[in-house]
Amino acid sequence: MWVFIDFQPRTGASGYIGGTALDVIIKAHPEYEITALVRSPEKGSAVTKKYPNVKIVSGDLDSSSLIEEQSSKADIVLHFADCDHVSSAKSIVAGLEKRTTPSYLIHTSGAAIIADINLGSEFGKAASDKIYDDIDNVQEITSFPESGHLHRNVDSIVIGANSNTVKTAIVCPPAIYGPGSGSGNTRSSQVPGLAKSSLEHGQAFQVTNGATVWNNVHVQDLANLYLLLTEAASHPGGGKATWGPEGYYFAENGEHVSPPLTIDGYADKDGRRGANLPRKSQRRLRLRGT
C-alpha cells in the first residue's frame, strides 16, 4: 500500500502533528510504502535519518504539479500541512481523481471552524450552551457558510471530492498538548505560545470576560486517530470508518477555559515564581468582528 503524506515544517513530517502521526503509523505498519513531501533537504534528512524507508520528495504547498503527481500514485493521502491552503487541497484532489482504483484522503482541519469570527466582539463574554457533536450535528458542521468560518473553504474542497473512487475523512482537533514523537518539532505552539506571550507582557490575559471554552487533545491520542483511519482505509471498502461528507471527526478528550494560565504559574530562569515577576496593569483583550 502506498501512502503519500503532505508535510510541511509546522505540522508535517518534521512538525508536531504530522511528525507524531508518521511515527505512530510507521511503528504500527513498517510495511507501508510512505512518501513524504518536505520543504527543504534538511527537513528531509531528519525524516530519513529516523525513518530510512520513507521516500522524500522536495517541494512546498505551491508545488501543484508535484502534489498532484504524488497523489495520483497513492492509495491514501494524509494532509497535515495547512488547513487553509486552497491550491494544495485542489492539487491533492486532482491527483486522486486520476486514479481508477479506490483512494482515501485524510485531511486535517481545525476546531476554529465552529466559531463565527464575524461575531468576534462577542468572544469571551459568555460561553455558548451549544455543543457540536460530530455525528448528530455533522450536516450542520459541514454546511457552515465560508464567510466567518475558518477552514470551511478547504473543508468544502475535500468533501466535494467524494466519488465512487475517492473517499475522504476530516480530522478536526482543538488545542493539542503533550510531547510529540516525530523527527523534528515535538512541542505544541498553542499553550507554549500563550505562556510566552504572558511572560513577555508580564501578566496573563483573558478575552473580554474570560468565558471562552476550548477543548483539548493529547498529541499521541490524535496520532492514534490518524492511525485508525489509515488502517481502515487499507481495508476493502474503507473498513469500519465513516467516510464521505459524514466522515468528520472531532478529536478531543477534555475541555478547559481558555486561557487556563496565570502568571503565578510561571517562573523565570532563576526559578522565581510569577508572584515575584514584574507585572503590568490588568488588561483584557477585545476582538473586533471581521
Image: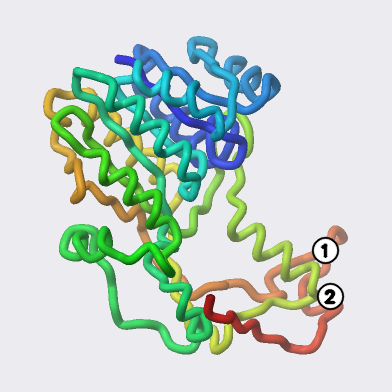
Relative to 155, 58 lies left or right: right
Q: Position of residue 112 (x, y in %)?
A: 44, 63
Q: Residue at x 62, y 20 (%)?
A: 44
Q: Residue at x 40, y 45 (%)?
A: 108
Which quadrant: the N terminus? top left
Q: Position of residue 77 (x, y in %)?
A: 36, 29
Q: Say which quarter of the image contains residue 45.
A: top right
Front residue (pair 266, 47): 47
Q: Position of residue 18 (x, y in %)?
A: 49, 36
Relative to 250, 101 lies left or right: left
- Proximity of marks 1 and 2: CB atoms separated by less than 8 Å: yes
Residue 226 circle label:
none
> Which callout, 1 or 2, points at the residue further toward the start of the chain?
1
Q: Is residue 201 above or below residue 40?
A: below
**Residue that carries the numbered disc 1 in the rendered image:** 268
Q: Secondary structure at mark 1?
A: loop
**Residue that carries the numbered disc 2 in the rendered image:** 277
Relative to 271, 153 lies left or right: left
Q: Label 2 amino acid?
A: Leu
Q: Residue at x 67, y 24 (%)?
A: 40
Q: Position of residue 178 (x, y in %)?
A: 53, 49
Relative to 264, 245 lies left or right: left
Q: Label 1 amino acid?
A: Asp
Front residue (pair 118, 11): 118
Colour scheme of the picture: rainbow
Q: Secondary structure at mark 2?
A: loop
